[in-house]
Amino acid sequence: METVRRLRAMASLCRQNAAYHPDRKWKLLAEAEYWEHVASEALRGHFAECTASSLGQPIANANSTSAGVAA
């Protein structure tokens, strides 16, 4: 969960920088969207692991789409 918090903080910093640098606004907003996507995938992987472990099922590659980011 700490990883998700850090990824969302990166997205927030990108949005803040976009407000102060209008010449790079679109690039920074695209980067913020990327970080939010990575955070979402990390959170999804985390809950998939939690659900699988609570059901007693083996975890079958829960983080395969999270770009190697563990929650």
Image (cartoon, rainbow, N blue to C red):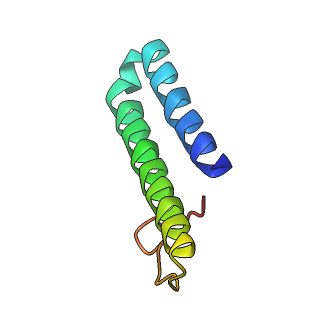
Q: Position of residue 19 (x, y in %)?
A: 44, 14
Tell me the quarter of the image containing the C terminus.
bottom right
Residue 36 horizontal/vertical position (percent): 43, 42
The extreme right residue here reads 2
Tag count: 0
Determine whether 52 is above or below 39 in the image. Answer: below
Residue farthest along the top direction in this orientation: 20
Q: Residue at x 56, y 44 (%)?
A: 7
Q: Residue at x 56, y 63 (%)?
A: 69
Instruction: Give the side of residue 42 with respect to residue 37, left or right.
Output: right
Foreground of the two, 46 or 6: 46
Q: Is residue 68 visible?
A: no
Residue 21 placement (x, y as % from top left): 45, 18
The residue that appears at 35% across and 38% down in the rendered structure is 30
Q: Position of residue 23 (x, y in %)?
A: 37, 20
Front in this rendered view, residue 6 or 1: 1
Q: Is residue 5 visible?
A: yes
Given residues 4 and 16, the one toward you in this image is 4
Residue drawn where x is 49% and y is 53% of the image: 43
| 59 to 24, vertically: above or below | below
Left or right of residue 30, residue 55 in this image = right
Q: Is residue 46 left or right of residue 25?
A: right
